[in-house]
């Protein structure tokens, strides 16, 4: 199995993304894909996340990280097949290929900033020196399970910042402050945003009394370590249900 064969078997069309989507990823670093999930699927995912939070309690999210003020879960593809779409959807895979060429899944996690919390400093998803265009190392996707609004903690992005070659913590006087060029990711549940992982971004404050649930499917170049070692943590059930193409994306 190789990358080309794997993506073809998973339904990625020859040529991948549409021209305007490639342009957005190259220039802004982000493409928004409305309606990738239907609302019945969104509701099933919400229910499963609630069940997992109840089951895991204080250990929830520990496979990757815990975050004060946010409910987190990690290693989700080994906890229910309903999350498989988050790392196998053809359009998302095409976007990851456009950014990274040869890649694998790093992790599938969830995040729900609690009311009154959730604000993050602008950051990139690659902690080493930021590469020049053409040498990007990570790609991320946010799957909206609630409507993202200007008030409930929508993610902010600085378009084009992935091309700066700089990290926000060194380039900005205050990465926690609003950036004059930032834009908010808003939209209805079922929307997916795929973005270059070197794009400056961060959660904003959830100023409502409700949830702002999302999933993140995170990809990296095949030579990099994964956030969650898929080979080490893959359950027998996961291995049995997935085809060879999906296993290649997981590197198992």
Image (spheres, helix red, strand yellow):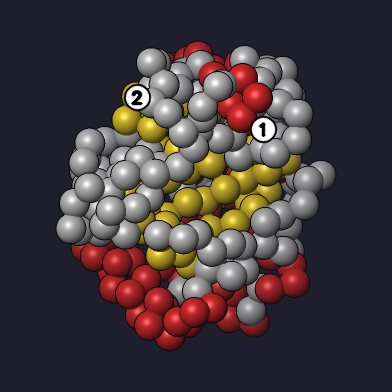
Badge 2: how crowded within 10 Å, few (<14), some, or many (20+)? some
Residue 30 appears in the picture as rendered = yes
Q: Is residue 129 above or below residue 60?
A: above
Foreground residue among 9 and 49: 49
State which mark lies toward you, 2 or 1: 2
Q: Is residue 91 above or below residue 83?
A: above
Q: Is residue 249 visible?
A: no
Q: Position of residue 74 (x, y in %)?
A: 54, 66
Pinpoint residue 199: horizontal percent, then vertical percent.
54, 28
Which residue is at the front of the view, 67 or 192? 67
Tell me which residue sits at (45%, 82%) in the image.
Answer: 57
What residue does disc 2 label?
Answer: 183
Q: Residue at x 55, y 35 (%)?
A: 123
Which residue occupies 41% across, 21% down?
179
Are there few (<14), some (14-19), or many (20+) residues within 10 Å of tag 1? many
Q: Secondary structure at mark 2?
A: strand
């Amino acid at each position: 199995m190789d990358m080309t064969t794997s993506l073809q078997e998973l339904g990625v069309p020859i040529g991948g993304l549409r021209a305007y989507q490639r342009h957005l990823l190259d220039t802004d670093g982000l493409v928004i894909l409305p309606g990738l999930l239907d609302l019945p699927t969104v509701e099933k995912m919400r229910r499963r996340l609630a069940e997992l939070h109840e089951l895991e309690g204080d250990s929830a999210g520990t496979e990757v990280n815990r975050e004060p003020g946010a409910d987190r879960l990690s290693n989700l593809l080994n906890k229910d097949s309903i999350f498989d779409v988050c790392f196998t959807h053809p359009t998302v895979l095409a976007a990851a290929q456009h950014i990274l060429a040869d890649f694998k899944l790093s992790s599938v996690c969830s995040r729900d900033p609690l009311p009154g919390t959730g604000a993050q400093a602008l950051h990139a998803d690659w902690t080493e020196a930021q590469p020049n265009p053409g040498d990007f190392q990570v790609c991320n996707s946010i799957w909206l399970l609630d409507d993202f609004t200007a008030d409930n903690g929508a993610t902010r992005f600085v378009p084009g910042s992935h091309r700066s070659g700089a990290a926000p913590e060194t380039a900005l006087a205050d990465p926690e402050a609003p950036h004059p060029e930032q834009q908010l990711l808003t939209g209805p549940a079922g929307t997916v945003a795929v973005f270059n992982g070197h794009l400056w971004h961060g959660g904003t404050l959830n100023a409502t009394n409700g949830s702002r649930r999302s999933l993140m499917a995170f990809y990296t170049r095949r030579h990099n370590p994964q956030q969650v070692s898929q080979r080490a943590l893959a359950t027998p059930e996961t291995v049995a249900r997935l085809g060879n193409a999906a296993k290649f994306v997981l590197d198992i």
